[in-house]
C-alpha cells in the first residue's frame, strides 16, 4: 500500500480479523467513533496552525528591517540584519548558520 509503507495486504487482513474478533458487532460503532475523534483532532490542529501563523505574521510585522532611515543618519546597529557566515565546524554533520553581529 502506498500510504502505509511497510504494511502489506496480509498485515492489513490480520489487523482486520483481530479487530473483528475484539469488537464483533460493535465494529461499525467503533469505526464511527474513531472517525469522529480523528475529525476533532484535525479541527484542533487546524486551529492551532492558524493561531501559530497569525502570531508569526504579527511578529514579522513588528520587526523593522528598513534599509534607509528617514533622517539620513546612520542606522543603529540593533536595527541592522545580522550577516550570515558559512563557517561549518569540521566535526558537525549539520550546523545552523552563524550570525556575525558586528
Image (cartoon, rainbow, N blue to C red):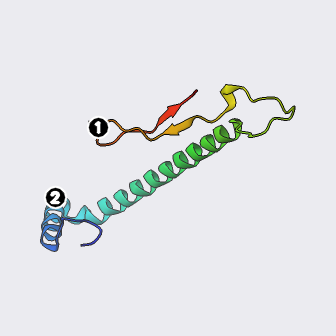
Residue at disc 2, secondary structure:
helix
Of 75 and 95, nearer the camera is: 75
| Dot 2 or dot 1, earlier in sequence | 2
Q: Which residue is mark 2?
A: 22
Q: Is residue 85 above or below residue 40?
A: above
Residue at position x 29%, y 42% in the image: 93
Which quadrant of the figure has residue 18? Answer: bottom left
Which quadrant of the figure has residue 6? Answer: bottom left
Where residue 64 appears, as percent x and y from the top left, is 71, 36
Q: Residue furthest right?
A: 71
Q: Is residue 25 left or right of residue 64?
A: left
**Quadrant into which the C terminus falls:** top right
Q: What is the crowding at mark 1: few (fewer than 14 residues within 10 Å), some, or many (at least 20)?
A: few
**Residue mark closest to the camera, 2 vs 1:** 1
Residue at position x 40%, y 56% in the image: 38
Give the CA separation, mark 2 to mark 1.
55 Å
Amino acid at each position: 500500500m502506498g500510504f502505509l509503507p511497510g504494511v502489506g495486504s496480509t498485515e492489513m487482513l490480520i489487523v482486520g480479523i483481530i479487530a473483528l474478533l475484539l469488537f464483533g458487532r460493535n465494529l461499525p460503532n467503533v469505526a464511527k467513533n474513531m472517525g469522529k475523534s480523528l475529525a476533532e483532532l484535525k479541527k484542533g490542529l487546524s486551529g492551532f496552525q492558524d493561531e501559530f501563523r497569525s502570531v508569526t505574521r504579527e511578529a514579522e510585522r513588528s520587526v523593522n528591517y528598513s534599509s534607509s532611515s528617514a533622517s539620513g543618519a546612520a542606522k543603529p546597529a540593533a536595527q541592522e540584519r545580522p550577516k550570515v557566515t558559512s563557517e561549518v565546524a569540521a566535526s558537525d554533520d549539520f550546523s545552523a548558520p552563524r550570525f556575525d553581529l558586528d
